[in-house]
Image: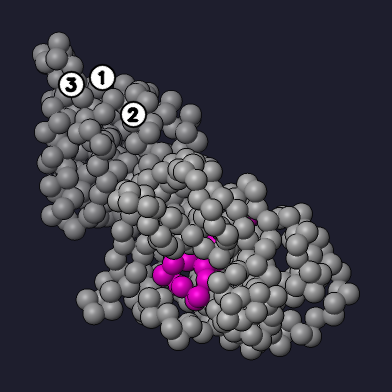
Amino acid sequence: MSITLGVILGNRDFFPDALISEARRDLLQVFKDLEVEPVWFSESDSKLGAVETWSDAVKCGELFRANRPRIDGILVCLPNFGDEKGVADTIRLSELNVPILVQACPDDLDQFGLARRRDAYCGKISVCNNLRQYGYKFTLTRTHTTDLSSATFRDELKSFFAVCRVVRGMNRVRIGAVGARPNAFNTTRYSEKLLEAAGISVNTIDLSEVFGSAARIDSDDSRVRQRIDQIRTYADSSAAPAESLLKMAKFALVVDDWMASLGLTATAIQCWSSLQKNFGVNVCTIMSMMSEQMMPSACEVDIAGVVSMYALQLASGRPSALVDWNNNYGPDPDKCVLFHCGNWAKDFLPDIRIGTAPILGTMLGEENTVGALEGRTPAGPMSYGRVSTDDASGKIRAYFGDGHFTNDPLDTFGTA
């Protein structure tokens, strides 16, 4: 996946010119290998193509501003100390509001003479201090100085690309809320206005509209038959009655058309208990298929949950899943069972099959819960996160971290 970066080469003129030229050479190779399109000075636009003076900042700011729609982030590269005001002024004049990564090249212990001395270690501190004074947030490399030709720097860039994807994606995402929040689920409350202020729009539709539209679709409609075939190809449906597959297919078509009409990327759907009572099916399979197609879908109108799913998806480039931190795993304090009825993407469930939701079935009739998926996620690394709106403080909050799925024995139904 290609990305466009605005690139600022910082310079101070009493440092060796060769350091700037070498940095440009190394960056060009990195950009080629990682499919980065740089927007930066040519070597004829300023001395060595670097930014140092106020005049340089004005010209570079104009360059960035002219390319604003396509710039995903800004890379500040310091081959030497650099000019902190030149860097900060360029960003201010660019009028960009994108992530900023600050990198500094390391000095070599045997090259502290005038011919090779950098002082970028100190320069980075000065640049970051100025960015903070100017009100800009920025990303740091894990080590204070990082060699441009190293694998470490490439890894830093890849992580930064994920930040850029999340910021750009979250600033314009449109979410669909299908149905009302179940009355018992206060945990899925959220502030639509706080999300809107962050560029996340929520659009709503009542389940009665979905059910009514689905009822008007002819069962012999070619789109219905095609969707049923897609469901059967997607997951083992041998235990699912034909009538349940028909209902799921019609539901999917209505939601598809509604999403397309409003340009929606993700959905949160009321599942418990209107779907079972009034439609006679679980739509977990349909939600799983959407998530697998990078259109994440969460249950119980959990808008904050699907916002979290979308952020994780943007960061990883893979489908995400809404999970419950559901059970302790015996006495082990560092393990728990992640569980759901479930609607996880196929990416999590190589042995995916359509079943029922036995817990819901005790109250709603298990025959009305066909469509819940079953499967076990294989062992491997995982990242988790959750976004929520803190209405009392007027803030959007989040937590995130890393862990591992394990292969410990677990005898349960659903997705786990």
User: Is residue 234 shown above or below 15?
Assistant: below
What residue type is disc 1 on?
Ala
Can you tell which mark lies on residue 152?
2
Q: Residues within 10 Å of mark 2 (few under 14, many from 20)?
A: some
Mark 1: secondary structure: helix
What residue type is disc 2 on?
Thr
Is tag 3's residue or tag 1's residue first in the polypeptide sequence?
1
Magenta stretch in the rendered image: 291-306
Is tag 1's residue or tag 2's residue first in the polypeptide sequence?
1
Q: Quadrant of residue 282?
A: bottom right
Disc 3 versus disc 1: nearer the observer: 3
Q: Residues within 10 Å of mark 1 (few under 14, many from 20)?
A: few
Q: CA distance from mark 2 to mark 3?
A: 16 Å
What residue type is disc 3 on?
Asp
Q: Quadrant of residue 80?
A: top left
| Callout 1–callout 2 Cβ contact below 8 Å | no
Q: Residue at x 25, y 36 (%)?
A: 142
Disc 2 versus disc 3: nearer the observer: 2
Mark 3: secondary structure: loop
Disc 1 versus disc 2: nearer the observer: 2
